[in-house]
Every structure is written in structure tokens, then in C-alpha cells.
Image (cartoon, rainbow, N blue to C red):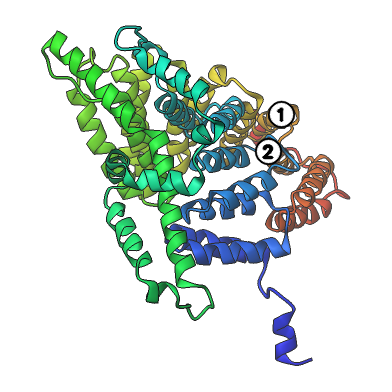
Amino acid sequence: MSDQDEGEQGPKSSFTTYIAEGDQLYQKGEHVKAIESYTTALSLQPDDRNCLVARSRCYLKMGDPEKALKDAESSLKEDNEFFKGLYQKAEALYAMGDFEFALVFYHRGHKLRPELQEFRLGIQKAQEAIDNSVGSPSSVKLENKGDLSFFHKKDEVKKGKPKEAVRPLKREQKQQSKKESPKTEKTARQLLGELYSDKEYLEKLLKDEDLIKGNLRSGMKVQDLILGGIAYLDTRTEFWRQQKPIYARERDRKLMQQKWNKTRQNKPCDPTGYILRSLEEIDMALAAGNAEGSCKKTRQVLHTVQAWSDEHVPNKREVMGNLYSCMGNALIEMGDMDGALDNHKRDLDIAKENNLPEAKSRALDNIGRVYARIGKFPQAIEAWEEKIPLAKTSLEKTWLFHEIGRCHLELGHHAVARDYGDRSLAAALETGDSEWQLNASVLVAQSDVKLGNFPSAVTSFQKALEIAKLLKDDAAQQAVQKALNDAAKHTTGEPKADQSTAE
């Protein structure tokens, strides 16, 4: 067989390799190449939901929310409660301007994973976009004063003129009327900002008859390319108009001015909007691998919020705790564990002082994570055990019990580790999460090996192997199979008692 025939057979590397390659390209901002890697990976495992979510994220970055939505929905086919797929579907719907549907899926994800900040921020930004699109009922007052003769004249026109005179304008006529409206052009200029000059340039090119008759090397007509660019900018104009329409800005500005006149004091402009946008930017930077940028942005926002009064920002302390949490997470990625621990402890202090159970749960989780990363397992256990009463869902409990059990295993407390493994597995079975069932089964099996209970360890490893096969996780299958083989070698001998159980 020739080399050419071998090359035509398809991918030469493994699924895991293409996934890793795609992740690296995504972090570098090379989204087109990342899509190619994820697509190749999907040719090997077409139903891998994590890969579908990763490619959906790339499509979203490329400005193609339709393809992003398609991949997100595909990731939810087998499990409609897959939280990553729910979040990605909500993000795609939001980018398409379907804010109401996006809000529905942000809520679904938040119900399943309330500890994740992404869903909470998604709910807030979608709700804000909906409010900005339709306006707040409390801010709109209808009055019957003024000249109402316009409506009588309108009725007369309907009765006295033939239907042809009042039929709707055609699409071309509407577009022409839009071009002739100075107010519409001013609105577009405000919404597009620097991109408006690009729109003007494309419209100017469209008037060059000689140019638009030509073709590109690919065979595509120049005219079609220009029209496509203009259509895209028009689409973005409408999207941004819905997110924060000009009339809403003008109304909000007037209302704010009225409040300023009454109070005669300076106050921050739209603090809620600023905070939500900033938190989203901070999370996006961290998710993209830019921990330093996330940290820098957090410091700037924290400095700004600290300067505001409690009157202007009633939940100021809660916001500051959230920012300390963001700072701590960024510092973890930067390797500054001392700084991360300090910020997460500040978050915990604020949560306790202001009786904020969700913030307290978040802070304890992060503190435990830092201690575990630096090998201080007793401190990690202490933080996570304090969090147990605050855990609301079975899914939250399963990973919490697993992490505590893992720390006990590292300390040699094998019997305690097995107990937490059993608790983690029970919670994972209750929530139906296969990945955590796999993790919990492995923890139970490893604890049994240390305790000398090899038959029990073999049984747990076998269960874990079955789950790994269902998940199509090659790396997990190899690791579990090796551990299973090692444990099986001892089943013929007498189990050895583990002296560390006394601990």
C-alpha cells in the first residue's frame, strides 16, 4: 500500500491528541485551526460531548452562533442536563439575540450547578438585555395629553383611500427609507462605533460598478462578498441595539439626571451594569488562559467599587467578596498560592460578617482547593468539612466528598478515605453523573487496595472500567485497567490488614 493511500485513510493521531491540540490553539486565539483539530477529533468519536462544546466555543468566537448552537445541542442529545452543553447553548442563543431562550438555559444550568458563577452571570446579563430591549414598565408612563387628531386623520386615511395607498412598503423601499433617515444612521454610527467607517467603505465600494462585476480567485463574486459584509454589520447593529437600544440609553440618562437633580450629589453611572460587565470580562480572560489580564482587571474593578458608597451600591460587600474570589482564582493559575489564599480568606470573612451562605460555600471551596494544591491536606479537609452543611445539590456533595476522601488517602487515613468514597459514590448515583461515579469508584478501589481488601478493590475497579468505557475515555480505561490487573494479582493471597486505619 502506498503512502498516499495511507494518508487518505484519515487521522493518524489519537482522539486525545487532537483534543489537546485544539485546546492549545483555542488558548492562543487560533480559532480556525482549533476548529479543524476538534473536527478531526470528532471524526474519531462523533458523539464526544466535551469536544462538541469546545468546537461550539470556537464557532462563537468566530462570530458564527448558528453553528455554535448546533454543536451545543448535539452535546445535549444523550444527556440534556450536561451543564457544559447547557451553558454553551445559552451563550449561543444570547449571541443570536434570543435573550429569552438564553435566560431559560442559564436558569437550567444554574439549578443543576448553583456553585458555578458563569450561570449566575449569564442570568444577569440575559435579564439585563431583555429589560433593555423592552424597557422597564415602571419607567414608562403613558399620558393622554397632547394633540390626538393624528389618530383621527389616520382613521380617515384608512376609510377614504384605496387599499393600494396604505399597503405595506416593500423590503427594498424600507431599506431605502432607512438609508434616508438621519436618525437611523446616527443610531447605527453610535452602535457600530469604529466599525461604522468600515460599513461606509463597503457601501462606497458597492457603487463601483467595475469592481463589483469582478470575481475572486475562489470564484466568489466581489459584489456578494461586499453585500455579505454589509449584512453582517447590519446584523451586529441590530444585536447591539437589542442589548442596549439608543432610546433606552436616552431614557435611562434622563431618569438618572432627574435623580441627580434631586439628590444633588455625584453617584456612579449604572453600577450594576458596570459590575456585571466587568465580572464577565474577568471570567472570560481567566477562561481564555489570560490569568494576568484577569487579575489586573479585578484589581481595577475592586479599586473602583471600594470608592463607591454603600448607598449607591447596597450590596457593596458582597460584590467585593466576589472580586476577592476572582482575584484568588487568577492568582492560583499564576502560581501565587499565598496571594490566592489571602484573597479567598478575605472573601470568607466578608461572607461570615454579612451572613452570605453561598459566598461562604464558595470561599471554603476555594480555600480547600489552595491548601490541597500546596499539599496541606489537613487544612484542606478542615475547610471542605466546614462546607458540607452548605452543599445544596447531590452533584456538589459528590465532588466535595471525593476531594475530602482524596486528601485522607494522601494522609494515609485509608478507612476514612473509603468512607468518603462511598458517600461520594452514593451522591453521584443519586444525581446520575457518570463521570463522578467513575471518580468515586476509583477512590473506593484505591482505598481498598491500601486496606488490603483486594477482592473488594477488584469489584470497584471493574465498575470503574465499565463506566470509563461508556464515557469513551481512553486514558481512564488504560489507567483503571492497569490498576485492576495489579489488584487482581493479590486476590489469591490473604488480605493484609492496614495499620493506618487506626488513624
Res 55 quadrant in image: bottom right
Q: Can residue 168 be seen?
A: yes
Closest to the observer, 438 or 117? 117
Circle 2 — which element? helix
**How far across and down, in percent of the image, does residue 269 sit?**
22, 25
- Badge 1 amino acid: Thr
Where 308 sits versus 460, above or below?
above
Left-right relation of 409 to 331: right
Q: Decide: marks 1, 2 in contact (CB < 8 A)?
A: yes
- Badge 2 amino acid: Trp
Tally the numbered discs.
Answer: 2
Q: Can residue 354 be seen?
A: no
Q: Which mark is residue 436?
A: 2
**How far across and down, in percent of the image, does residue 352 sit?**
38, 15
Kindly identify the residue that appears in the image at 70 percent across and 39 percent down: 447
Q: Farthest residue in the left direction?
A: 264
Q: Farthest residue in the bottom direction?
A: 2
